Image: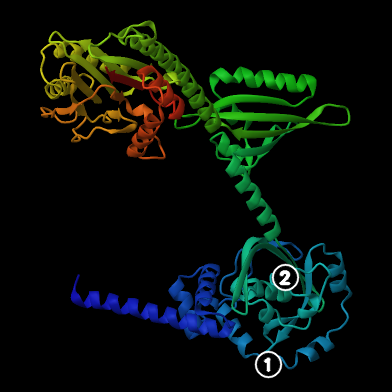
Amino acid sequence: MPMSAELAGVGDGARERAVLAEARVVLADRLGCPSGEALQHLIWLARDLDLELDEAAALVVEGDRAVAENPDAPVGGVGRGAVVAEAPPAAEPVAEELLRRVAAADTAQDAVILASVQDDPGARAVLDASLTSAAHLVPVRDADGRVVDFLYAGVNASVDDLFERAPDELVGRRLLRIEPGAALSGLFAAYVRVLEGGEPFVRGPFLYSSARDGVTRASRMTVRCVPVRTGVVVSWRYLRGEDRMRWRLERAERLVAIGFAEWDLATGRITGSPQMAANYGLDAVDGTLVPDELGAVIHGEDRELISEGLRTLFARREPVEVEHRVVLPSGRQRHLWVFAEPVLDASGRPVTINLVSQDITRRRGVERALARTRREILRQQALNAQERRVTATLRRAILPDPESGGVRRLPGVRIAVRSLAAESEARIGGDWFATRSLPDGRALMAVGDAAGHGLPAAAAMARMRNGLLGMAYTGRSPGRLVGWLNDLVGDLEPAATGTAVVAHFEPQSRYLEWASAGHPPPVLLRDGRAGPLAAEADPLLGAVPDYDYGTNSTLLKPGDLVLFYTDGLVERRDADLEDGIARLSEILCECEDPEPDAVLDRVLERIEHDRSADDTTLFAFRVV
């Protein structure tokens, strides 16, 4: 693009913006409103005059009347006395000129004009007969005889105003002072044509807007203007109440996807709300639905349901309910609930049918999802119950039953065991214990816990216990045994973790050698005092590959009692593990009977642990 043309375009744009800004100022001054509201009035003016916005702005600023050179042109080829369906007028007269005159007009003679108006029975008759708002307007002319405004000479009792002004606030006032929107909407020009041409005028419904003290209000309205001897009578009706009700109803219909319709059996015409058409995926013209179009979108498998419903309705003259599917243009199916109620004439024959439809696709989708979820839950419950039965059976098969003498005696000690599965079958876990007399005369004692619950934990528990019992016959130290056990757990499939404490007791020397892998430490009861054996904290099984676990050594005395246990005995959701071990030590100190069985019974009685949450295993031995 040449530089000169580019500069010219920039200059033209700047001029248009300047003219638009000036027009906003001019209109704001004339209407007594903010500039933002004046811009909206300018937009309406351009729309009503069928002009571009910059052209309308130029008219306001410069008073250009080129578009109004033929103000006397007839509206249409109709005879006198006919009602003219009037479109928004062109620029006759130019609205901005009217507003300028309104702002500058001298209203001192208005009272004189009203006083000079002769009695007009025709105007009174129209006012009294009108069921809507009506006003008798008399013309105000300038020195040249042109109509520059109208005066409210009278109003009826039904008068309605956008700003809720009373009748006495209108009578005696000028139209354009009260309703500047009459100029911007072209109504004033239409009233002048009725006055001068004698032909009635009707318009609407259309959107009308006016302003007062910087406040703009709008409503759809209908207007009718007829000539009388002393001026014109205008009747109007604001549709804001109907529009508000229609908007509320349509919004409510959309929110709940309910549509309404009426089927006239005489004409076959179905008149329905927009949502009725939307439910069927159709576009209604003026709210009219074609029965054949409705039938075409109904799912083929459901058409017999509709036919049966209609037969029942006509045969019994009673309402019917039907649920059916429709096929949308996209191919997607929609579920509709339809209620049909016949309206009968005096002879009992149906003349119309009131229809209600609701889109229940989402509800049916939710119901299907809930049914599917319920089936999945029931199947999972059955699987879980079976798994719990297998878990409990496996646990009983692997672990010796202490009550039936299944725990082997060990040299140099008296032992007692309590192995309690969780009361909640779903929480049965992987607690285990093991005792063996080794070939070299030492006693092997171990307690462990495979992480988790259910069958996976029970399977891991079986592998840990059986693996340890096999490795124990090597005679290696507890630390070495726990290290091997760590390697075994690390190789399990699926992956598993766990804790364990493994000990050797040498009855001749009374030394207790033990190693722990993330397990609560053993508690020693000696001479009425109890506390956990000190040791370095080593990681749990399966957490750190090839870890070198240390072996701890404790010299025991005759009468000492050592308690091994799993975390289910001392863990609390509202307390630290150390607090649970401290509470266990206090209970041990209170035991009067030193025998292992009595001690374990006392501990279980006083510890108040949660039997439903986890397995609990206790193993106690007393040095003899």
Q: Nearer the viewer, residue 38 or 247?
A: 247
Q: Is residue 64 visible?
A: no
x%, y% of residue 559?
29, 22
Residue that label 2 marks = 161
Q: Are marks 1 and 2 in contact (CB under 8 Å)?
A: no
When the figure is inspected, residue 384 is found, relative to residue 339, above or below; the finding is above
304 relative to 435 in the view: left or right: right
Residue that label 1 marks = 106
Question: Where the C terminus falls, by quadrant?
Answer: top left
462 relative to 360 in the view: left or right: left
376 relative to 396 in the view: left or right: right
User: What element does badge 2 sit on?
Assistant: loop
Q: Does label 1 or label 2 sit earlier along the sequence? A: 1
User: What element does badge 1 sit on?
Assistant: loop
Question: Where the N terminus falls, by quadrant?
Answer: bottom left
Q: Nearer the viewer, residue 48 or 259?
A: 259
x%, y% of residue 123?
84, 73
When the figure is inspected, residue 370 is found, relative to residue 215, above or below; the finding is above
Q: Mark 1 packing: few (<14 Cα in 10 Å), some, or many (20+)?
A: few
Q: Residue at x 64, y 64 (%)?
A: 219
Q: Amino acid at mark 2?
A: Asp
Q: Residue at x 25, y 13 (%)?
A: 435
When the figure is inspected, residue 510 is found, relative to residue 286, above or below; the finding is above
